[in-house]
Image: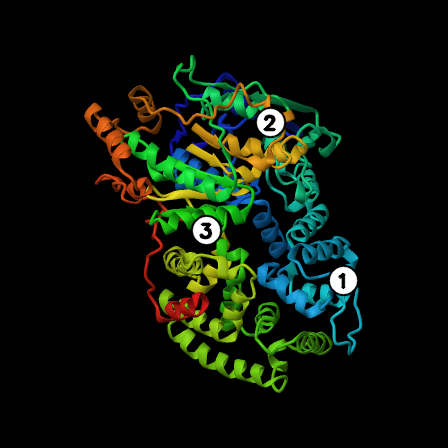
Amino acid sequence: MENGDSTVSLELKITDDQLRSITYSHEPLTALKIVAGPGCGKTHTLIARIVHLLNSEVEPSQILVLSLTNRAVLSLRSRLIDLVGTELAQKVNIQTFHSFAMNVLNDLIPNQYELLGFGGTQMISKLVNAPFLKRKDQITKLLEQQMANRMSMFRKTSPTSSSNLKVQQLIEFLHNTNVLTSSSIISQCTLLLRDNTQKLNHRVLIVDEFQDMYPELVQLVAVLASDCHLTVAGDPDQSIYSFLGSTPYVLNGLDKILPHNYSEIETINLTATFRMSLPIIKSSQLFSMFKKPLTPVESPAPSFLPKPTKKYFTDIVQEVDFILEEISRLVHQCGGVLKPSDFAILSFKNDDINYAQSVFERHGIKTQKLGSSPEWTNNELYHFINFLRVINDPGADYPLISCLSIIPGVGHVSLSSLVLKAMSSGSPIFHLLKGVRPVIDNFVEDLNTVRDRFFQYFDDPDEIFKITLEFASKYGLLQAIKSNPNWSQKPDSFYFKQLESIRVGFHMASKLRSPNETLVQYFIAHFADEIVKPTEDAINFSTIHGAKGLEFPVVFVLGATQVSTFRSEETKRLIYVALTRAKQLLYWNKYLYHEDASEEYKFQNEFTDSIPSCSYEYVKYLSKITRRSPPSLNDYQQGIMAWKTTKNKTQLLATAPSKPKGQTSETHPILYPNSVALPFMKLGTRCYHSAVSGLLRRVIK
């Protein structure tokens, strides 16, 4: 691809199999399947293949790249920018499936579609008021079953005077307000594209993480691949979304997905891993269903590399105390070669991660919970977005009814009546609020006052945040938080950190928005695109699902993952993903009450119950891996002595030296085609607004 007067020229360190994948033909109706083990350079290969396509006279706008998560998309996009520059990279269409589908819907049917969020499922539960619709998964499953039938979305129903909204009426209400579930967005996009194939202008389709494709995505891929070249990449051993309907066998069944006129499907296996040490490779192979023969690029491996550690504990309290002390030992005995950000603590249970994180924070240790979207979008603070949208535009029925549903004193009878009146009259719900209930009259009066202030400070991120939070707190946000049965067990910093994340998001939106966008418009469109990245002075905590695609020098996998280890294929794959996040040191713990003697022999050769020795030879080896300067022998010995002579060993970690001067801070990017890297704004230890202070005092009290 010509870029000015020259082609894009790259010098890459790659294996022969990677080279074959990069340079494989892109003729129409041919397919390339790249099966890549963990750390085998899949993303690097896909990016290099895109560059090869650009150099092969494929226009950037003719390349469509799709993946499931914001993190994967951001990684692909940022690496492509590093190789070919921002201007050329931004012309390549790299999106998540849901972002792509939403854009297609809004392009072909000019409505403002939106995704059913956390607040929406709570609102639906109150509207329908049925005992079988209390949990989020129950609501989502029912709606997706209804929306899967295209006609059910368009069939008219006659409003009735029933105190409860019927499910079919609810479906019509959601259709009228352009609200879709995750699956229905994909299904509707597929239906539209089948009838509008002329809208497809890509010559090459690249699908990342193909092992996680569930049926709706598979159908969309089949439509998108109807007249182009297809490249897919994935690893069946890392298929961990069976609860969505994905299966690890979808990669092997690629020929059954594609149109019958595809002439060729080539498979290339990437088995040389750039990530893991040989002992970690051997231990993870115990859980590989497909037994890929992974080999480390570094060969021969040094003889002093430690085996993964397998410790036994009575409960999570004892386990977390061990992890806390072990991280402190490693940081000090390795002479600063290992930083807090090199450590990750993983579990498949959010509650275990939250508990472990709270213990570290009580010891004064900085922590960070990783994820591909802000944590507050999956709890009661999501209501903040609905209040923001109502202040910005009271005529939007869906966010308005969501806000009304959490106001104390507003029951399902009032909500259902409003929805039915709106459906029969065609009027916006906001025009029907007068006289319904006194608290709703107060809501409307305060909303009008708030809107005057809101538009007075329309470009001030702090004021917009403060105004919205005060209004939301007055009309149900606090009660929604307290309705969570686990809210009292959460640490004091839990909600404050997330509120600060929202405030920081407003500041970033004010910098990233385009000239023709308002701050609020940009924030509403992109609030869920935030990617939390590791920062050097914080220890990382994550669910295994949230850590997928990441890697760390040292990983601790909490013992809760040991339940029925070998009795479920899904559990095996989950553990495989967890173990393969580790590059050098791996701890896979177990609780004594999970003991199963029939399974223990499988671990004896690949795990040890001893903690790894931090010899000076190994510390120097780690310094090469982490690209940090090794300590002098004297500093190394002083670190070991400090560890041995200190009684409160966890305090050593809390007072660990900060990063050396001259090192740049991490970035906290937002996923957006025109985004730039901004300095990471750390979550502070004090509130910046009285609204935040007041909310926290009332929540924590």
581 to 620, vertically: above or below: below
Say what amino acid the circle numbered 1 marks: Phe
Say what secondary structure mark 3 lies in. loop
- Of the two numbered discs 3 and 2 on the same chain, state the one appearing first in sequence: 2
- Which badge, 3 or 1, comes first in the chain's sequence? 1
User: Foreground mark, 3 or 1?
Assistant: 3
State the image quarter where residue 119 is shown: bottom right
Residue at coordinates 53% horizontally, 72% vertically from top-left?
Answer: 476
Q: Where does label 2 land, which residue?
A: 287
Q: Give the residue at mark 1.
A: 154
SS for callout 1: helix
- Whether the residues at callouts 3 and 2 have beta carbons within 8 Å, the answer is no
Would you say the residues marked 2 and 1 are in contact, meaning their CB atoms lie under 8 Å apart?
A: no
Q: Position of residue 573 (x, y in %)?
A: 61, 32
The answer for how far apart the CA atoms under marks 3 and 1 are is 34 Å
Callout 1 crowding tier (Cα within 10 Å): few <14, some 14–19, many ≥20: few
Between discs 2 and 1, the one toward the N terminus: 1
Q: Which residue lies at the image location 49% right of the left edge and 27% below the top edge?
A: 39
**Mark 3 and 1 residues: CB-CB less than 8 Å, in contact?**
no
Rate crowding at label 3 as few (under 14), some (14 to 19) or many (20 or more) other CA atoms within 10 Å: many
Q: Is residue 234 above or below residue 523?
A: above
Q: What residue type is labelled 2?
A: Phe
Q: Circle 3 sits on which residue?
A: 530
Residue 277 is at least partly visible in this image: yes
Q: In which quarter of the image is the C terminus?
A: bottom left
Spatial CA span between label 3 and label 2: 32 Å
